[in-house]
Image (cartoon, grey):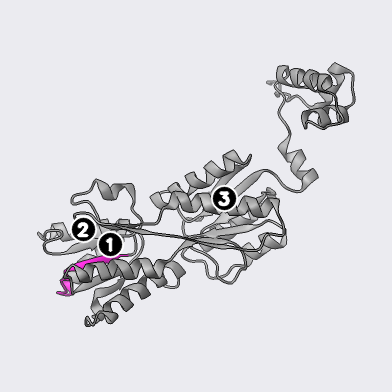
Amino acid sequence: MKNLVKHATIIDIAKILDISPSTVSRALNNHPDINAKTKEKVRNVARNLQYSPNTIAQSLKTNRTTSIGVMIPEIKHDFFSSAISGIEEIAYHSGYTIVVCQSNESYQREVLNANVLMRHRVAGVIASISQSTKKSDHFKDLIRQKIPVVFFDRVCDDIETSKVVIDDYKSAYDAVTFLINKGYKKIAHFAGPQGVGVYEKRLKGYVDAIKENNIPFVNGLLLHAGLDIKDGYNAMDSLFKSKLYPDAVFTVNDPVALGACKRIKEAGLKIPNDIAAVGFSNNVITTIVDPPLTTIDQFPFEMGRKAAELLIQTIENNLMKPKTIIIDTKLIVREST
């Protein structure tokens, strides 16, 4: 049977130097009561023994770690992977590490992730909720355990905590108004799952832009799709089977727009001559498809950075009041319109 690897401890360092473990601990933490010569000796021995602090023991003592939990629906989407990069950049420079959990759009899995992060005594949580999340008790439990929570993108509106969002309503309204000003009149909208705040706001922006520009509203041009390429494909296919041919489509996100474009091409129609398309999020692939897709940039990297900044400020200043930051979006006009 192989011997288990023994990790060096503060006690091992203390025995070698013939000093107390408490002196070693204070030296490693740069305590002012320990002289520079002792600190240097302790650090040299620690380096030779490849000593690393026991973060589990530290968390039991301080009741928290230097880990930040990040809860997202799906890593595969460019938006969330970019947001994670922004979060990690700020966390790294502030001395924190991140632990990423994905719900796969499942409320039950999201609750499980919250409980796991709570048991691991994370310092705080940054979260974007799943499309099936209707209750927020698991986030309230985190806050009751004095684990601060910052939401981004998809949020729980019934919890008084910091949030980083965009103006989904205005972004959608402006995109549809842009299409109308370009001369498009029969504009379809492939909306996201019902009951999710960000998608409801984008839907309302679409509806108001149509009505306020005195364009007849056609119920058949509004479909509640999902969030993936196949959902956009199926929604466009459904329109064609119903003999409804829009002259433009505005979708809840970029994957849905790409699916719609695929079906448009299969029908022998040209983009944008026959049907124009506008997505939402500015995923990387929107620049390389043919034609490149007009879309709305949400600046997810910056959203992640801001969320991490807010959380770390909250962790290190318990008296900080909740704050909502609204990230400005930008309509990126490309050949699909």
Which kind of residue does numbered mark 2 sit on? Cys
Highlighted magenta segment, given as a residue range: 241-251
Q: Which label is found at residue 232?
A: 1
Residue 34 in sight here: yes
Give the quadrant of residue 329: bottom left
Label pair 2/1, CB-CB below 8 angstroms: yes
Q: What residue do we see at 42% from left, 60% from top?
A: 328
Vertical arrangement, residue 228 with respect to residue 158, above or below: above
Give the quadrant of residue 24: top right
Q: Which label is found at residue 261?
A: 2
Which kind of residue does numbered mark 1 sit on? Gly
Q: Which label is found at residue 308?
A: 3
Quarter of the image where the C terminus is located: bottom left
Which kind of residue does numbered mark 3 sit on? Ala
Query: Would you say 70 lies left or right of 4 here?
Result: left
Residue 282: image location, x then y, percent? 33, 53
Please state the total of marks drawn on the protein image: 3
Residue 212: image location, x then y, percent? 29, 81
Q: What residue do we see at 16% from left, 61% from top?
A: 264
Q: Residues within 10 Å of mark 2 (few under 14, many from 20)?
A: many
- Earlier sequence position, callout 3 versus callout 1: 1
Residue 238 in sight here: no
Q: What residue do we see at 25% from left, 58% from top?
A: 259
Query: Would you say 92 lies left or right of 231 here?
Result: right
Residue 95: image location, x then y, percent? 63, 39
Q: Residues within 10 Å of mark 3 (few under 14, many from 20)?
A: many
